[in-house]
Amino acid sequence: MASRPFKQVDVFTSAAYLGNPVAVVLDGTGLSDASMQSFARWTQLSETTFVLPPSPEAKAQGADYKLRIFTPGGELPFAGHPTLGSASAWLKAGGQAQQAGVLVQECGVGLVRLEMREGRWAFAAPPVQMRSMPEATLPALLTALGLQTNQVMDSQILNNGPEWWAFLLDDVETVRNLAPDHLALKQLGVKVGVAAKTGQENIASPLLISRSNRESRAFAGKSLRHEATDKPDAQLEVRAFAAAIGIMEDPVTGSLNASLSQWLIGSGEMPTDYVASQGSALGREGRVHIQQDTQGQVWVGGDTVICIEGHVALD
């Protein structure tokens, strides 16, 4: 088997092991789709990526590399934390961008631009398509989530490559205490994102959060505490459930936060500059930095930490 450079990057955190990890194979040249999918199943991370040279057409438009993104269950056209983590790994491995301070990624949704903003890389959120949820599906979906109708402030189906069925809920505690029926969500075949506004409160430490699912309870008492003092307060608490693609709960989700921000900023629910918290129910402390610029483009940023470096044997 060929030895290929590899890095595992923790994304949306400045402290290792408190964000969302992505496995990055830095040379995917010559790998078949089946090999990529097999390796992604083996890593059992929410996403595994493979870096390739950009196509000639994309390179002519400024692309620095091409990225293919796999979950254990299939390939995605775009995902947020793999975009940031792979960019970090590519640069650390010696990648040279065509433009200083700018990266351009070719992927399934086309070209995605990344910029250094306030000391961290951020990607330009792809345009989101929004539509209302079908009323016939809502009762079964709410039952699977364990929600009452009066706990739902608003809902929308959001698609920026991946599709998310998104709910704005009444209270942060409602979000934190959800214990979904993952089998029912898988049978419904939809990925679900839930969020609630926090106001000006600080997000509690994972040790203080009510844990309502088995994974959270198993993590309690041995949580890796984030001792940094610069962890920003968050204005939105987010969770993502993706049993439909083999991930019961994603720790921190760039694509969901990208589409949520466009929906909630556009509807006036959130300001044009805010921080979202995600992962607290899993003992993580992810922070997603959202900014909308003066042209209306939403940028999604986060810190990254490279945790593992080496090579993998892969044909």
Image (cartoon, rainbow, N blue to C red):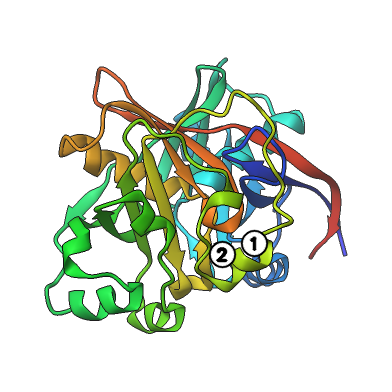
In the picture, the quarter occupied by the N terminus is bottom right
Residue 50 in sight in this render: yes
Image location of residue 241, percent across then percent down = 44, 65
Name above or below for residue 243 compared with residue 10.
below
For residue 250, above or below residue 259: below
Amino acid found under the numbered disc labelled 1? Leu
Question: Which percent across, then down, holds residue 260?
Answer: 31, 46
In front here: 189 or 197?
Answer: 197
Looking at the picture, tell me which residue is in the foreground, 208 or 61.
208
Q: Which circle marks residue 45 in the picture? A: 1
Q: Amino acid at mark 2?
A: Thr
Q: Is residue 222 above or below residue 246?
A: above
Quarter location, residue 155: bottom left
Q: Position of residue 175 (x, y in %)?
A: 37, 57
Q: Secondary structure at mark 2?
A: strand
Q: Position of residue 252 (x, y in %)?
A: 52, 49
Q: Residue at x 61, y 45 (%)?
A: 19
Q: Label 2 vs label 1: CA separation?
A: 7 Å
Horizontally, is 301 left or right of 219 in the view?
left
Mark drawn on residue 71: 2
Q: CB under 8 Å between callouts 2 and 1? A: no
Other-residue count near label 2 (Cα within 10 Å), few / some / many at <14 / 14–19 / ≥20:
many
**Circle nearer the N terminus (2, 1):** 1
